[in-house]
């Protein structure tokens, strides 16, 4: 009768260790890939949400401009504290009110106040985070709105028909 040779036994152990090592390396590679893809997915979601919020805010501004498009309904002002201000005028129950849209402390703000009252930017509420807000009025009466966020710069042009968009560009 022959005895088992220790060489064969060692070879079996090496084979098992090799297979286990390959399995562990495969599992670690899968885990690393999953973590990387999860991070990329999270960053993509955050960027998409930021762009969506910014685009939604600028679209809301364009819709406000269209809603306030009436005689003397839209004015563009330059305030020494906040810079460019969009002033939208309306009559509610016989009283005159103004909605101010401006950039303050890293956010686009909106403030509804009586038309005769003082403009107090600190009383407005935040719409979206924004580094800058600018309104340019062209010779044809169109308004070019620009909102600069951390991620992007969004520009939209609006062509008010009735109001003529009076204000800083007319002066």
Image (spheres, rainbow, N blue to C red):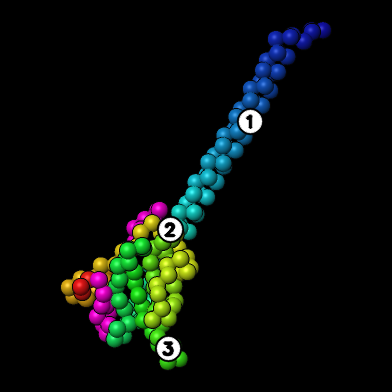
Q: Earlier in the sequence, mark 2 or mark 3?
A: 3
Q: Which one is in front, 141 or 122?
A: 122
Is residue 157 at least partly visible in the picture?
no
Residue at the disc numbered 1: 23
Nearest to viewer (mark 2 / mark 1): 2
Asked if 28 appears above or below 134 in the picture, the reply is above
Bounds of the magenta segment: 148-168
Mark 2 to mark 3 CA distance (whole Å)? 30 Å
Mark 2 to mark 1 CA distance (whole Å)? 54 Å
Image quarter (top left, top right, bottom left or bottom right) of the N terminus: top right
The x and y percentages for residue 127 are 46, 66
- Secondary element at image label 3: strand
Q: Residue at x 24, y 80 (%)?
A: 164
Q: Residue at x 30, y 67 (%)?
A: 78
The image quadrant of residue 152 is bottom left
**Furthest-bottom residue in view?**
94
The x and y percentages for residue 137 are 23, 70
Q: Residue at x 29, y 86 (%)?
A: 71
Q: Which one is in front, 119 or 168?
A: 119
Is residue 132 at least partly visible in the picture?
yes
Residue at the disc numbered 2: 105
How many other residues sit within 10 Å of disc 3, few (<14), some (14-19) or many (≥20)? few
Q: Earlier in the sequence, mark 3 or mark 1?
A: 1
- Secondary element at image label 1: helix
Nearest to viewer (mark 3 / mark 1): 3
Residue at the disc numbered 3: 95
- Secondary element at image label 2: loop
Q: Residue at x 17, y 73 (%)?
A: 139
The x and y percentages for residue 110 are 43, 70
- In the rendered structure, find residue 130 and report the number of the disc placed on it: none
């Amino acid at each position: 009768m022959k005895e088992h040779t220790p060489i064969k036994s060692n070879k079996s152990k090496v084979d098992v260790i090799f297979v286990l090592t390959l399995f562990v390396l495969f599992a670690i590679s899968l885990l690393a890939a999953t973590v990387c893809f999860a991070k990329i997915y999270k960053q993509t979601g955050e960027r998409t949400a930021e762009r969506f919020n910014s685009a939604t805010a600028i679209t809301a501004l364009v819709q406000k401009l269209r809603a306030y498009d009436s005689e003397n309904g839209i004015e563009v002002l330059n305030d020494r504290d906040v810079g460019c201000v969009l002033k939208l005028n309306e009559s509610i129950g016989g009283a005159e009110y103004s909605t101010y849209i401006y950039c303050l402390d890293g956010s686009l703000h909106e403030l509804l106040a009586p038309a005769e009252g003082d403009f107090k930017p600190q009383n407005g509420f935040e719409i979206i985070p924004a580094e800058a807000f600018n309104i340019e009025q062209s010779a044809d009466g169109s308004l070019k709105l620009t909102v600069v966020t951390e991620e992007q710069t969004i520009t939209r042009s609006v062509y008010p028909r009735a109001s003529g968009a009076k204000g800083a560009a007319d002066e």
